[in-house]
Image (cartoon, rainbow, N blue to C red):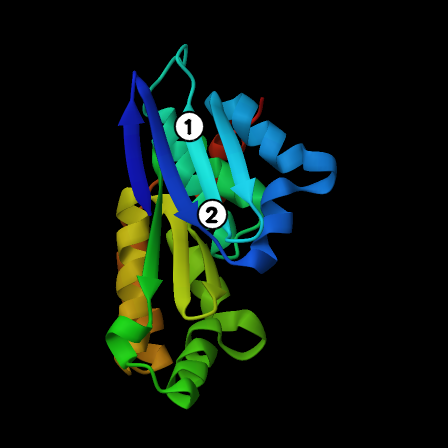
Amino acid sequence: MDFESQENISTFIVTIPNNRIGALIGPNGRVKNRLEKLAGVEVKIDSGSGEVFISSKPDIKDPFLVIKARDIVHAVGRGFNPQIAFSLIDEDMYLEIINMKTVVGTNPNKLKRIRGRIIGKEGRTRRVIEETTGTRISVFGNTVGIIGPYERLKVARDAVHLLLEGAKHGTVYGFLEEKAQKFRLSTREIWDKASRDSKI
């Protein structure tokens, strides 16, 4: 991920997998167009290299929006549904990407097993983490992406790291249950708010 700045215009360059370019563009360009309108940026996509150029416009109302647009592109690239990725336009929503290789190494069989532990049978483990923390999780390739409010995201991240380090599922569920009691807003309230903020 690169950053350039010139004449009051900031540009981020994010490289995403080629098989996620279609999701970023959307049917008839709707996702790309919505991102440009929502964040006040210009998005150019190199379908050959997978490079996405996100540039602020000179009249952008909030310069921080170009960073939010960068995160949205990164989220779509890491497997998130664009509708969920757009929740990042909310100033209270954050994205974190965990590279499983940095924790468990590069052995393909081990990575496959760890992916299975995080997702769980029929998606149960991922669903438990999402529901108890009010976050959204994408397991894509060798990465785990998490979107949510900062405090909740931290708890989800800790739960994922426990699984990466070999903790039993029961231990992780107990950890989540204990931490979740301090959260006030329900999961539905969080995502209803994020959905309102991401509308054009």
Q: Are dots 1 and 2 in contact, CB under 8 Å?
A: no
Mark 1 surroundings within 10 Å by alpha-carbon count, few (fewer than 14), some (14 through 19), many (20 or more)? many
Q: Which amino acid does label 2 sit on?
A: Glu
Q: Closer to the camera, 150 or 133?
A: 150
Q: Closer to the camera, 46 or 125?
A: 46
Q: Residue 14 carries which label?
A: none
- In percent of width and height, residue 86 lies at 51, 37
Q: What residue type is labelled 1?
A: Ser
Residue 135 vs 189, above or below: the answer is below
The quarter of the picture where residue 98 lies is bottom left
Residue 9 vs 79, above or below: the answer is above
- In percent of width and height, residue 33 lies at 61, 29
Specify the farthest residue to the right. Answer: 28
Q: State the CA–CA distance, disc 1 to disc 2.
A: 13 Å
Q: Can residue 185 be seen at all in this image of the molecule?
A: no
Q: Which residue lies under the disc numbered 1?
A: 55
- In percent of width and height, residue 21 lies at 59, 50
Specify the farthest residue to the top. Answer: 59
Q: Can residue 58 be seen at all in this image of the molecule?
A: yes
**Residue drawn 49% across and 52% down?**
77
- Where does the C terminus fall, quadrant-wise? top right
- In percent of width and height, residue 103 lies at 25, 75
Residue 26 vs 113, above or below: the answer is above
Q: Which residue lies under the disc numbered 2?
A: 51
Q: What element carries label 2?
A: strand
**Residue drawn 29% across and 22% down?**
6
Mark 2 surroundings within 10 Å by alpha-carbon count, few (fewer than 14), some (14 through 19), many (20 or more)? some
Horizontal side of residue 64 vs 32, given as left or right: left
Q: What element carries label 1?
A: strand
**Residue drawn 35% across and 56% down?**
97
Query: How many marks overall?
Result: 2
